[in-house]
Amino acid sequence: MNVNDTEIAWAILQKNGYARTKDLGEADVILLVTCSVREKAEQAIWNRLRHLKALKARRQQARLPLRIGILGCMAERLKEEILHKEKLVDIVAGPDAYRDLPRLLAVAESGQQAANVLLSLDETYADILPVQTSTGGMTAFVSIMRGCDNMCSYCIVPFTRGRERSRPIASILQEVRMLSDQGVKEVTLLGQNVNSFRDTSEVQFQSAAAPVLSRGFSTVYKAKPGGLRFAHLLDQVSRIDPEMRIRFTSPHPKDFPDEVLQLIQERHNICKQLHLPAQSGSTRVLEAMRRGYTREAYLELVHHVRECIPGVSLSSDFIAGFCGETEEDHQQTVSLLREVRYNIGFLFAYSMRQPSKRSVSELCGRNDGNIKVIFPDAEIEDAAGCKALVRAQPGDYVVVKVTSASSQTLRGVLLCRTTLSRSAACP
């Protein structure tokens, strides 16, 4: 998905007169495309920014300005922290703001920081043909939808990439034809929930029936009727070039109607490989994850897939150590791995994120509006006039000056201790 975002951004910048260079030393602008799905990906960007800090300092000494930008999910999630913590960052653009890059860069040219992290309900970049980052490549990614509505309890995607929306099929087919003409031999259709694709751009298909979910699966949202579905898209894409292999990722196991499975089995150029993210082998943990299925329903789907597509290659995602997971839950995941016998597995340790991650140097409380407020644990003066420095204790009421905010949390600095019955005046 980040490769595809990079190619979209390149297409926009190229149209506005920017040229690409592989030499950091001659670059006027350096843009980092980021991911927030796992903490390790974000840490890699913070490390990269530290390396670029020295480069920017050298360029400033030589009076050769260098603009640095953060694009994508990390920009969406950590806009304020990026702009304030890393003063060397000039622009911040979320996944739905790439069209605004020329304006943001123009603002940065004047010496100001610029940001746009507005999420869209309809942006799919359907009219933008991505600029391939590797010339002469035999494979390519084609984004068919953006965002996700599933709201799994561990996942940040709905908040960093927005609600689910699909590209018109006509624009997807145009891009695949172009890639075929360029000699590309394998295309991967991309989406956060790729097989829930639903194109409502053609009026005659807007009143079609709601999709049928895999047996034993459910969703947290109401099924959306109307539109051309993934089976129709897959059928059309596979007909463009019989010598072009077709893959897709990442699907949700709830969206595998028989029409899709039969199509994969029938078409020789649709790869007989499916990604079926399980995340856990424990029904109890799956419920806590809000995945919408049980272990038994997942296994029934696996058996059905193998009946429909003999010799199919299966891969999956798993999270180990999810909140409240017991050793028994973990062993159920291990037994699922052994029973299914995946060809490939992507295994990750669950890691807490801010503000959930507790720091020994920070305290947390809630204000009158029940909003979580995080602030450093520091010595303060008592509001009653006592000059002795004290530390806030559990149960104390304190006055905090808010300095930044996210969608669910406030951050600030501790001013003084107070009481509930009086309004404290702190310098």
Image (tube, rainbow, N blue to C red):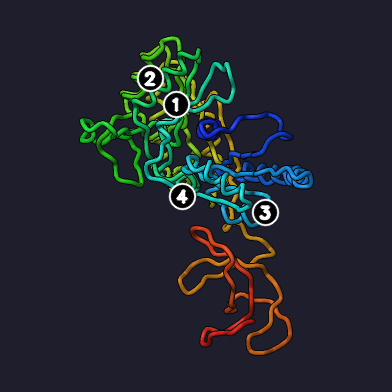
- Secondary element type, mark 4: loop
Where residue 377 appears, as percent x and y from the top left, is 68, 70
Q: Write the residue at 55% across / 67% down.
A: 373
Reading the chain from its start, which is encountered first: label 4 or label 3? 3
Which residue is denoted by mark 4 in the rendering?
A: 118
Reading the chain from its start, which is encountered first: label 2 or label 1? 1
Q: Which circle, 3 or 2, is nearer the viewer?
A: 3
Give the numbered dot on residue 189.
1
Task: Identify the amino acid type marked 2.
Answer: Val
Give the side of residue 81 with respect to residue 130, left or right. right
- Viewer-closest of 37 and 425: 425
Q: Write the residue at 43% across / 38% down.
A: 146
Q: Which circle, 1 or 4, is nearer the viewer?
A: 4
* Distance between the alpha carbons at the discs numbered 4 and 2: 32 Å
Q: In the displayed image of the protein, which residue is found farthest to the top?
A: 243
Disc 2 vs disc 1: Cβ atoms closer than 8 Å?
yes
Give the numbered dot on residue 295.
none
Reading the chain from its start, which is encountered first: label 4 or label 2? 4
Which residue is denoted by mark 3 in the rendering?
A: 87
* Distance between the alpha carbons at the discs numbered 4 and 3: 21 Å
Reading the chain from its start, which is encountered first: label 1 or label 4? 4
Task: Identify the amino acid type marked 1.
Answer: Leu
Where residue 319 appears, as percent x and y from the top left, is 55, 41
* Distance between the alpha carbons at the discs numbered 3 and 2: 45 Å
Which residue is denoted by mark 2 in the rendering?
A: 237
Q: How many neighbours does mark 4 have within 10 angstroms: few (below 14), some (14-19), or many (20 or more)?
A: some
User: In the figure, 37 relative to 342: above or below?
Assistant: below
* Distance between the alpha carbons at the discs numbered 1 and 3: 37 Å
User: In the figure, 397 relative to 58: above or below?
Assistant: below
- Secondary element type, mark 1: strand
Q: Is residue 388 visible?
A: yes
